[in-house]
Image (cartoon, rainbow, N blue to C red):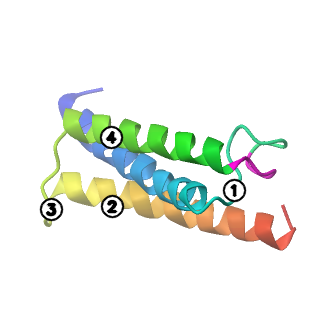
Amino acid sequence: MDALDLSLALPFFAGAFLCNSLPHLFAGLQGRKFPTPFSRPATIGYSSAFTNVLWGIFNAIAGLVLLNSAPVSIGLNAGFVSAMLGATGLGAYVAVHFGKVTAGGR
């Protein structure tokens, strides 16, 4: 993997991790249960508010570490677009997945 690939991959995954931190932090800080990878069944069952806060913090730290490794400036540039694609891609997937879970469709 060359430097250009890495400079685009890091912001992409940073955007995905930062996007994923939000629903877990919001649910946990409101004292609500929300699915996590640790629930049974994974990503379908519900985890405690405390577990969601910890999972949200982990995702936020992972995203910030990745951003620190490949700093992104806001604007029309490859790094920023890559980060927004990561956040949008994961956000769209999570919205569809958890829309089904909360509607009972799994």
Q: CA distance from mark 2 to mark 3?
A: 10 Å
Give the structural element (helix, strand or loop) at label 4. helix
Q: Nearer the viewer, mark 3 or mark 1?
A: 1
- 4 or 1: tag closer to the N-terminus: 4
Q: Quadrant of residue 5?
A: top left
Q: Amino acid at mark 2?
A: Met
* Sooner in the amino-acid sequence: mark 3 or mark 1: 1
Mark nearest the camera among 4 and 1 is 1
Dot 3 corresponds to which residue? 74
Magenta span covers which residues? 43-48
Identify the mark at residue 94; answer none if there is no mark.
none
Disc number at residue 34? 1
The location of residue 85, given as percent across then percent down, is: 37, 59
- Measured in 3D between alpha carbons, the distance from the residue under mark 1 to the one under mark 2, in whole angstroms, is 24 Å
Question: Which numbered disc, 2 or 4, marks the residue closer to the eye?
Answer: 2
Coordinates of residue 63 in the picture (x, y in percent): 36, 42
Q: CA distance from mark 4 to mark 1?
A: 28 Å
- Quadrant holding the N terminus: top left
Q: Amino acid at mark 3?
A: Ile
Closer to the chain start, of discs 1 and 2, is 1
Q: Is residue 96 left or right of residue 65?
A: right
Q: Confirm or deny contact between disc 2 and disc 4 (CB under 8 A).
A: no
Residue beneath disc 2: 84
Q: Say which residue label 4 marks.
A: 9
In the image, residue 97 lies at what x, y percent?
69, 62
Q: Position of residue 15 (x, y in %)?
A: 36, 52
